[in-house]
Amino acid sequence: MIGRYQLARWTKAALGATLGACVLGLVATAVVRYAQTQAVVDLTRDAGFANHSLPSPDPRSEEEMEGLRRFPDGAVALQPLIDATPTGGVLKLEAKIYAAPGRITRPLRIEGVAGTVVDGGGIGSIVTVEADDVTIMGVTFRNSGERHETTDSAVRLRGRNGIMKDNVIENCLFGFELRQANGNIMRRNRIGSKDLPEALRGDAVRVWYSNGNRIEDNVIVHSRDTVIWYGTDNVVSGNRIEDSRYGIHLMYAHKNKLERNSFLSNTVGVFLMYANDNEVTDNVIHYSQGPSGIGIGFKESSNTLVANNDLFGNARGLFMDASPYDPEGWNVFRANRIAYNGAAVVFHSDWEGNAFEGNAFRGNHANVAVLGSGSARRNKWLGNLWDDYQGFDRNRDGVGDTPYESWSWADRLWMDVPDAQFFRASPALEMIDFIERLGSLTEPRLIVRDAQPVLEMREEAIGARRAEKRS
C-alpha cells in the first residue's frame, strides 16, 4: 500500500516536472519568436559591423609571417620574378607552384597557364597590387591566411584601371579586396572562400570607397558576400553566385548597376542598405530560403529601379523596410516575375513611396503582406497581373472590369503572430480563414488595391531577358 507521504512526494514531483516543462516551453517559444522576428535585423546588423574604418595592420612582422608560411616542396618565390619584370612588361608564369607574397608597385602584366598556382602558405594576403594598369590573368590563387581583421585576401587592389580575369581563387578567405581603387575590371574569375560556416567566410569581392569598377561574368560559390561600401558607378553584371550569404550587398553605395546576374540558394539575393539611385535589372534570384530568406531586400533605400527580374521560390520575394527613406523619393518595381515565393512582397511596416507597375504575381502563398497593423495601400499598384484575381474582362481589353483587392482575414494571424507562421498553408488555418470569409466576426483589412489589374502578359515582356554575355 502506498503511504500518504510517498503519494505526496510523487504529486509534488509530478507538479514540479509539469511546471518545468511549461517553463521550458515558454522559453522555447520566446526563443523561436525572437529568432523569427529578429532574423532580418540580425542579418543587416552583421553587415554593418565591418569596414566603417580601415582594418588594423597585422601585428606580426614580415619576418614572423614568413616563418609561419608553409609551401609545397619546390615552390618558386614569386617576388623576385615580379622585381625582374620591367615596367609595362609581361611576366609569363609556367605551370608551377609559386610562393607568395607578391607586391606589385609598377604597371605590368602577369600571365599564367593551366597549372599556374600562387600559394599563400596559409598566412596573410597573397598578392597586393599598389600600381595602376596592372593585369593578372590565368592564375590560381590558393591558401591565403584566415584573419578577418586584416582581410586576408587572394588579391588586394589599391591601384586604378587594373584587369583581373580568368583567375581561380581557392581556399582564400577573401577573394578580391578593393580599397580606394577605381576603374578596375574583375572578369570571368572563379571565386570561393574557405570551408567555414557562412558568417565566418570572407567576401568574394569587397569594394570599399571605390568607384567605376566592373565585376563581370564571375562564378562565385560558397562565399560570404559580394559587397560594395561607399562606392558609386560600379557595375555588377553577368555573375553567377551560389551558396553564399548576400549575393550582392550595397551599403551606403549609390548609382550602381546590378544586371544580368544569377543568384541561387543564397540567404539573400540582393540587399540595398542606405543605398540610393541604384538599378537592379534582368537578374534571376531563386531559392533564398530560411528565416532570413529574401530575394531583394531594402532598408532605408530610395530611388531604385527594379525591373525585369525573376524572383522564384524565395521565402520573401521582396522585403521593404522603411524604403524609400527620402520623403520625396520613389522605388519603382516594373515588369518583374514574382512567382512561388512564401510571400511575394513583405512590408516591415505601413510605409509609402513604392510603385509596382506591370509585374506578374503567380503562385505565391501570399502576394502582399504587412507585418503588424496597417496596409500597403499607400504605395502605387497599377497594371499588375494577379493570379488570384476573381473578376472578369467582359470587353476583352486585357484589363479587369473591377479592381483587384486583397483582404486580410484570418490569415492575418501569421502576419501579426510570428509563431503562427509555422501553420501557414495548413488545413487548420485555411479552414479558419474560410469560415471567417463566410461570416466575418472581425472587420477584415484591405492590404492592397490595384485599379487596373491585367489578365494576361506577354512572357517576353516580363522577368529576366538574359541578354547575351560579352566575350
Image (spheres, grey):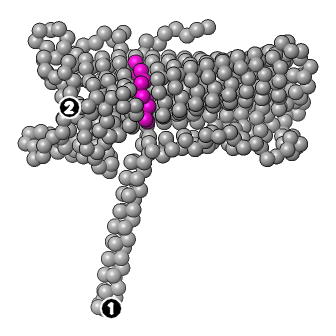
> Total marks drawn?
2
Instruction: Give whichever of 64, 120 is nearer the camera.
Output: 64
Q: Residue at (38%, 26%) from the top-left corner?
A: 329
Mark 2 vs mark 1, CA separation in Å? 63 Å
Specify few, some or many for label 2: CA neighbours under 10 Å numbering under 14, 14-19, or 20 or more: many
Would residue 132 appear left or right of 465 to someone viewing this image?
right
SS class of the residue under badge 2? strand
Q: Quadrant of the C terminus?
A: top right
Badge number at residue 5: 1
Residue 434 placed where, x, y %?
14, 40
Q: Quadrant of the N terminus?
A: bottom left
Q: Is residue 449 visible?
A: yes
The residue carrying mark 2 is 406
For this orientation, the residue located farthest to the left is 439
Q: Residue at (55%, 26%) from the top-left corner?
A: 241
Question: In the rendered image, which quarter is residue 390 located in?
Answer: top left
| Residues shaded magenta | 294-307
Asked whether residue 382 is drawn in magenta, I would say no
Q: Is residue 316 visible?
A: no
